[in-house]
Image: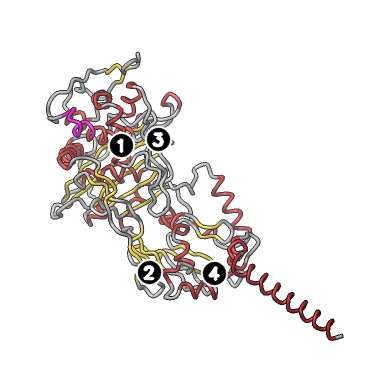
């Protein structure tokens, strides 16, 4: 009898050990797989069981949390949702997160180890810290000026501080209210379907996720390549540039919409956007150097994040001379985001140095204690400092007396470059209006802002579209907001046009 009791006791002990081993395996070894299982709703319930941290602009929260009393208790709210949607993105119980809400999700949700003094203890106890806050680099006045300037038109604006890379404005229109995607009721699903099915794509962040042919604004890059390579040594000397210019190996001819481009100097060609001069300059510089120069500005870089990913801007690395000529004037396969073209303008303003663009200034606890800051660093040296000085002079001429007079601001020095980008089959699409620029207050020691504006105005008459007429006034408003100056319209408002392609 004693033998059977011993066997039963041994079996019970074995079963107990097996139970403990299995519990250890589930809770420690396989915890990760259970945590990540879509069927496990414990994390989602806990995630929305406390208020989410906030995203701050100019010291004020543009996000909040509302107690719904439902199972997923706290719903995300947004102040001026459409204005800041291209920055915040959305945080939805049903559809997840996007943009800053996604890139900074750990901090905002309270799961980031930086928020805890004892992160290992929190991991073991599954404790959750209060959500932290994300302090952005945005200038609220510049953001509002960009949004108001675009109005009902499709388009985007990106503005940078050239010396630091801080993003001062990031706007995309049309926009949407991310608060419509908060909650779990049927209205959320209806809003999701409506927004994703809209023809004007309001959820597309045109400032960083859409690329466009940059048109004549790309001539800044071509001019930098020509000056750095020594193809042009004197900006006032005539160039050997016929008008029209027959594309190498082709019967096609490149023309201009302005007089005086035949053998024009770089200064005149830049001021009035002569396609023939810049097309030939691209060929003279050569594919290798043009490709390298574009890369120094940031083209063909697929790793840029601000902290959410930015679509890469592209310059074709395999093209024949005729295609290269078109690429050099911002056509063919050359494509850029507005943020990339703001980086081009910022490089000119910052002595040729491209600073890493960033949208987050610092991250804090819910009490305001800083847990991390975004370091400022140089991404690349796009051109020689002497070349940047020459380009600042050329861009200033464009605003003073060329195609960019609508960007002039009393009390500031402004440099710019306009562009009207053709697109579509046989260039049949309504052109995009571009303007890139930088501005320095008369009492400032350096340019304080660089801007890129693109306007898609499908309803406009094709012949009325120009970078100087449509996009430059928007850039002027944004720059004036940053400089805290009045964006008084110059006397030539709406009288100038962009004659370049």
In which quarter of the view is residue 103 placed?
bottom left
In the foreground, 474 or 333: 333
Q: Which SS type dominates the magenta stretch?
A: helix
Camera-side mark, 2 or 3: 2
- From the top left corner, tell me how far across and down residue 129 is, in percent: 48, 73
Q: Few, some or many C-alpha atoms within 10 Å of disc 4 (few <14, some 14-19, many ≥20)?
A: many
Q: Do the residues labelled 4 and 3 touch (CB within 8 Å)?
A: no
Could you tell me how many numbered marks the image carries? 4
Camera-side mark, 1 or 4: 1
Q: Residue, x 57% and y 52% (percent of image)? A: 192
* Distance from Cα at disc 1 to Cα at disc 4: 46 Å
Residue range (magenta): 225-232
Going from N to C along the chain, the mark reached first, 1 or 4, is 4
* Distance from Cα at disc 4 to Cα at disc 2: 21 Å
* Distance from Cα at disc 2 to Cα at disc 3: 46 Å
In the foreground, 76 or 229: 229
Q: In this view, does 271 lie to the left or right of 165?
A: left
């Amino acid at each position: 009898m004693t033998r059977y009791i011993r066997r039963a006791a041994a079996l019970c002990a074995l079963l107990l050990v097996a139970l403990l081993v299995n519990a250890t395996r589930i809770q420690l070894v396989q915890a990760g797989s259970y945590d990540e299982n879509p069927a496990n709703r414990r994390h989602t319930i806990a995630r929305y069981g406390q208020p989410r941290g906030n995203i701050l602009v100019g010291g004020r929260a543009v996000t909040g949390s509302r107690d719904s009393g439902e199972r997923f208790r706290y719903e995300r709210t947004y102040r001026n949702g459409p204005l800041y949607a291209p920055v915040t993105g959305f945080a939805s119980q049903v559809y997840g997160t996007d943009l800053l809400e996604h890139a900074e999700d750990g901090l905002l949700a309270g799961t980031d180890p930086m928020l805890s003094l004892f992160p290992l203890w929190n991991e073991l106890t599954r404790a959750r810290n209060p959500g932290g806050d994300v302090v952005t680099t945005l200038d609220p006045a510049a953001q509002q000026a960009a949004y108001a300037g675009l109005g009902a038109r499709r388009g985007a604006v990106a503005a940078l501080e050239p010396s630091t890379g801080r993003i001062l404005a990031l706007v995309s229109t049309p926009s949407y209210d991310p608060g419509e995607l908060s909650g779990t009721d049927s209205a959320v699903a209806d809003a999701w379907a409506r927004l994703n099915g809209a023809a004007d794509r309001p959820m597309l962040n045109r400032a960083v996720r859409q690329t466009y042919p940059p048109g004549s604004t790309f001539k800044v890059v071509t001019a930098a390549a020509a000056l750095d390579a020594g193809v042009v040594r004197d900006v006032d000397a005539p160039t050997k540039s016929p008008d029209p210019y027959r594309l190498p190996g082709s019967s096609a001819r490149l023309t201009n919409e302005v007089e005086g481009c035949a053998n024009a100097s770089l200064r005149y060609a830049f001021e009035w956007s002569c396609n023939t001069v810049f097309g030939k300059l691209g060929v003279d510089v050569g594919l290798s150097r043009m490709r390298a120069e574009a890369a120094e500005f940031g083209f063909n870089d697929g790793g840029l994040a601000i902290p959410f990913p930015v679509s890469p801007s592209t310059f074709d690395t395999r093209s024949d001379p005729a295609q290269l000529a078109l690429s050099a004037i911002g056509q063919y396969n050359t494509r850029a985001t507005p943020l990339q073209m703001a980086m081009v303008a910022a490089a000119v303003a910052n002595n040729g140095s491209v600073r890493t663009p960033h949208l987050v200034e610092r991250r804090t606890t819910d009490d305001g204690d800083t847990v991390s800051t975004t370091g400022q660093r140089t991404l690349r040296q796009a051109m020689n400092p002497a070349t940047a000085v020459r380009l600042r002079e050329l861009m200033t001429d464009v605003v003073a007396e060329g195609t960019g007079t609508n960007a002039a601001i009393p009390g500031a020095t402004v440099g710019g470059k306009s562009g009207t980008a053709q697109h579509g089959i046989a260039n049949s699409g309504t052109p995009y209006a571009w303007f890139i620029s930088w501005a320095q207050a008369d009492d400032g020691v350096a340019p304080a802002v660089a801007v890129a504006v693109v306007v898609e105005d499908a309803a406009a008459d094709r012949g009325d579209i120009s970078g100087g007429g449509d996009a430059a006034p928007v850039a002027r408003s944004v720059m004036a907001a940053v400089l805290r100056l009045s964006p008084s319209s110059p006397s030539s408002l709406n009288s100038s046009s962009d004659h370049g392609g």
